Amino acid sequence: MYSACFIIPYFGKLPDNFEVFLRTCEINSEFDWMIVTNDNTNYEYPSNVHVKYIEFSQFVDSVQTCFDFPVAIPQPYKICDFRPAFGKIFEKELYGYQFWGHCDSDQYFGKISNFITENILNSYDKILCLGHFTLFRNIPEINNLYLIEDKAYKQGYKDVLTYEGHWIFDEWPKSKRTSINRISKQENIKTYICPECFCDLVPFKSLFRRTIFDFQTETWALDIVKSEIYLWNNGRLFRCYMDSKKLKTEEILYVHIRQRKLHYKNYNKEKKSFLIIPDSLLSADSFSDKEIIKILRKTDFRGIFHPDEILCQMYGIKYYCIRAAEELKSFYIDFMKGEM
């Protein structure tokens, strides 16, 4: 099997779900992760998850040594724009790996090799195209892809890495900006696209509902299923929902839980399975179809009362003020550069 390593820089306290995230990494022994962080919490890191402890300022200094112009990393979130350059930034750490990539920590993996097979790794140089899961072949041609100018937008990596706001270079900016994916399309890089093999959930909603990305049109659409939960069972992850009063289960690669606060009081790492429902995790050695159906029906009540949307309205003022300030700052930067 090919060797691959996901890199996750994370500064500040690691998220509440991190212990569960590590468990879903551990089962995927064919893949490695490297956590770059200043959180010294004594987690039980599995053998395939490596940790590099470093302060944020030191990390910024180390990134700067890779470039001959001043880069802008005013806050940790800006690191996302540097993800396409990880092949260069972490060149020493990635020596010997055939693939490298990036993902988020607010997600849970199923059995990755059931979806990212050896045949796929043989056939493609880039695997998937979203920030929460992308793999690149570890060769100079692909590692230097971010250096290529976007001919459509007349923009390059220096525009991105010197920009203080969040550019979304690793994914798909809504505005007319370049990204590693648009450069990949321009250069005809062999990219494996499987939009229905994972679940990227709509944030700030009381029910789980996934979005599906269209690689060709660069647009998102809501899945027709309006309510679902997820079953992690001995390393495999399943999407569970009702269809014509019958339980449907589909194995998936991973689920991306976005901007959600889950409770873990009913999670037990000694149990073989756990359910991921919109407000918490539930553990057991196994779940019958009857139990899953019952939980799905109970979950549907959240769609009637919308507790998370109500909480967003009550307590989301600070969050939205912060986001508005970030957008205003980005607008000001663009305006001053004459890009508006």
Image (cartoon, helix red, strand yellow):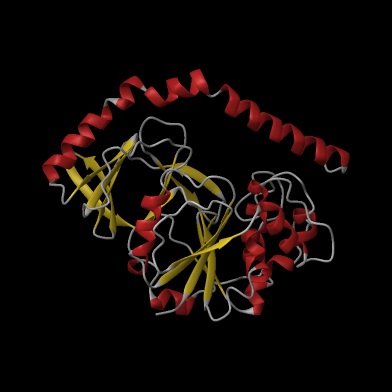
Position in image of residue 233 (x %, y %): 23, 55
Q: In the image, is residue 228 above or below residue 22?
A: above
Position in image of residue 55 (x %, y %): 65, 54
Image quarter where the C terminus lies is top right
Q: Which corner quadrant of the image does residue 89 belong to?
A: bottom right
**Looking at the image, which residue is at 35% across and 40% down?**
224
**Looking at the image, which residue is at 52% across and 78% down?**
98
Position in image of residue 259 (x %, y %): 48, 38
Looking at the picture, tell me which residue is in the foreground, 172 or 54: 54
How many numbered circles does the render carry? 0
**Looking at the image, which residue is at 47% across and 36% down?**
203
Q: In the image, is residue 120 above or below residue 257?
A: below
**Looking at the image, which residue is at 42% across and 69% down?**
48
Position in image of residue 170 (x %, y %): 62, 56
Apparent side of residue 213 relative to residue 294 in the rendered image (left or right): right
Residue at the far top in the pictured view: 314
Looking at the picture, tell me which residue is in the foreground, 74 or 162: 74
Apparent side of residue 277 relative to residue 85 in the rendered image (left or right): left
Q: In the image, is residue 100 above or below residue 163?
A: below
Image quarter where the N terminus lies is bottom left
